[in-house]
Image (cartoon, rainbow, N blue to C red):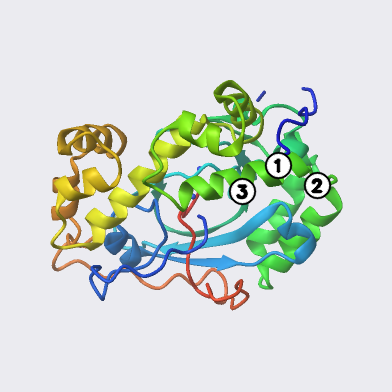
Amino acid sequence: MGMDSPASPDTPVPPDSPAAPDPRASPDAPDLGRGVLHPARAAELITVDRLAPDPVVAVFVEYYWLVRWDLHGLPPYEQKVLAHPNVHLVFEAPVARVYGVDRSLFVRRLEGAGHVLGARFRPGAFRALAGHPVSGLADRSVPAAEYFGPGADRFNAEVLGAPGDPAALADAFLRPRLPAPDPVAAEVAAVVDRITRTPDLRRVDELAAELGLTVRRLQRLFAEYVGASPKWVLRRARLHEAAERAGTDGGLDLAALAAELGYADQAHLTRDFTAAVGVSPARYAGSRRTPATPPGSAAARPARSWPRCTRSPGTTAGRPPGTPGAP
């Protein structure tokens, strides 16, 4: 690979292409994207759309995501997300913010009614905009004005109140503010894609050898461009696979899944999953049909902040991102 070219010098939450349908999954399982925990509950309360950027912006932005909710008459709801290795620009009240890679469990509290528009940057792509290593944004969010100037706050108010196409509005905001593409960022994105598409890839040294890089060089590239270590990205890909399987496969064999994902045994998978999600995979699987609205309560009303958008990339029309509300 050409990633040994030197990175340019210079701190300040919710994937990926859709996976093929799992034949073992429940036929009525909601498809909210990898990383969204308890998707059946989430689907009762929120709507999520994935919107395509124009070709110029798409060099940097993988897609826009639009989350809408209306919980009037219902208690607040906390959506939990195992975030992906992406930086997000999020237009939300009161100000737009840039979210770095969240390496823990991202939790978004929703109440009342509202909507949020986000831009999910391709792995590595935000480095050229940031002007410093993306690791400085890890586990943090900062006002978008720090990177996009005071126009970010003006645009935030405009896009949250506009009735038109939010993707077209976001394109118009971002297009004149994008720097020249960084070829190293594109190569880093390809490596991240290799990891996320191969959750049984197990070791950083194996990945480095496959790429013709030293482990140390790979670690520096990920700190500079991704904002998380290659070990974290490998681990997170396995946890995404485990959570998706536990949430959709009613007859999941955890011991077999642990072996498939490269864990030494089921106990190691259970410890890793519990540390990240907060519950064991067995308990998570058992909760997959628990409704978000208790019996006898009013059902959540459809969100009505924006007309439903139809602008979606390729064959993924209507498929939501894995990071509703924020990374």
Amino acid at dot 1: Ala
Amino acid at dot 3: Ala
Query: Horizontal and vertical percent for residue 86?
Result: 57, 44
Query: In terms of secondary structure, where does tag 2 sit?
Result: loop
Query: Horizontal and vertical percent for residue 216?
Result: 58, 21
In the rendered view, does 70 fall on the left or right side of 277? right
In the rendered view, does 112 fall on the left or right side of 137? left
Query: In terms of secondary structure, where does tag 1 sit?
Result: helix
Label 1 packing within 10 angstroms: few (<14), some (14-19), many (20+):
many
Query: In terms of secondary structure, where does tag 3 sit?
Result: helix
Real-space Cα separation, disc 2 to disc 1, in angstroms: 8 Å
Real-space Cα separation, disc 2 to disc 3, in angstroms: 15 Å
Q: Which residue is mark 3?
A: 190
Q: Quadrant of the N terminus?
A: top right
Q: Which residue is mark 2?
A: 181
Foreground residue among 287 and 25:
25
Real-space Cα separation, disc 3 to disc 1, in angstroms: 9 Å
- The reply to whether callout 2 and callout 1 are in contact (CB within 8 Å) is yes
Task: Report the mark closest to the observer, 2 or 3.
Answer: 3
Foreground residue among 115 and 49:
49
Amino acid at dot 2: Pro
Q: Which residue is mark 1?
A: 185
Is residue 138 something that shows in the picture?
yes
> In this rendering, is residue 258 above or below 203?
below
> In this rendering, is residue 223 above or below 110?
above
Query: Horizontal and vertical percent for residue 247?
Result: 24, 57
